[in-house]
């Protein structure tokens, strides 16, 4: 963007210098010449103002576009992280539930074996 601005500024300065030299060397009356130079410089100043306003508008539009893109990407990342968190919590709860069910199953097996062993021991004491 800086190079483009420098080129435009150089062209405007060159055009102004060329026009001024052309008017100075032209065979006209002094007052007419001064009026012509003043009008031409006013036109150049107006063109520079218009170009500056246009460049400012373009720059604002570009920065707004970049801001919206960044905002969209950050929002997408936040949503992805939230989804990942929810998936991780769900998987952890499921794993805890499965582990608890397995522990209850093992506990019931141990209870059953203890009960069977206790009954066998009770029967052997009574039969002796």
Image: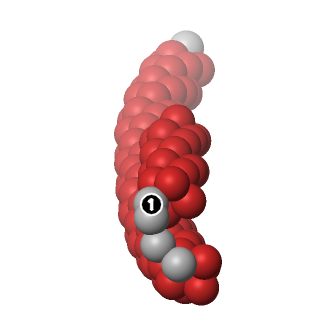
Q: Nearer the viewer, residue 105 or 70?
A: 70
Where 14 sits versus 69, above or below? above
Name the residue: 51% across, 54% down. 25
Residue 32 visible from this viewpoint: yes
Where 78 sits versus 116, above or below? below
Residue 100 visible from this viewpoint: no
Q: Secondary structure at mark 1?
A: loop
Q: Quadrant of the C terminus?
A: top right
Q: Position of residue 49 (x, y in %)?
A: 54, 76
Q: Nearer the viewer, residue 92 or 35?
A: 35
Q: Nearer the viewer, residue 40 or 77?
A: 40
Name the residue: 52% across, 36% down. 3
**Circle count:** 1
What is the basis of the colouring in this image? secondary structure
Q: Nearer the viewer, residue 23 or 102?
A: 23
Q: Position of residue 124 (x, y in %)?
A: 51, 17
Circle 1 residue: 26
Q: Position of residue 92 (x, y in %)?
A: 48, 43
Residue 62 falls in image quadrant: bottom left
Name the residue: 56% across, 59% down. 24
Q: Position of residue 38 (x, y in %)?
A: 58, 80
Name the residue: 50% across, 21% down. 117
Query: Mark 1, residues whose alpha carbon is within 10 Å: few (<14), some, or many (≥20)?
Result: few
């Amino acid at each position: 963007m800086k190079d483009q601005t420098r080129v435009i500024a150089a062209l405007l300065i060159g055009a102004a210098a060329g026009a001024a030299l052309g008017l100075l060397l032209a065979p006209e009356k002094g007052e007419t010449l001064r009026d012509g130079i003043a009008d031409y410089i006013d036109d150049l100043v107006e063109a520079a103002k218009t170009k500056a306003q246009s460049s400012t508008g373009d720059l604002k539009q570009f920065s707004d576009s970049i801001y919206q893109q960044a905002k969209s990407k950050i929002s997408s990342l936040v949503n992805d992280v939230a989804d990942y968190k929810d998936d991780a919590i769900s998987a952890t709860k499921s794993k805890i539930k499965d582990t608890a069910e397995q522990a209850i199953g093992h506990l019931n097996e141990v209870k059953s074996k203890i009960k069977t062993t206790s009954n066998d021991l009770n029967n052997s004491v009574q039969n002796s």
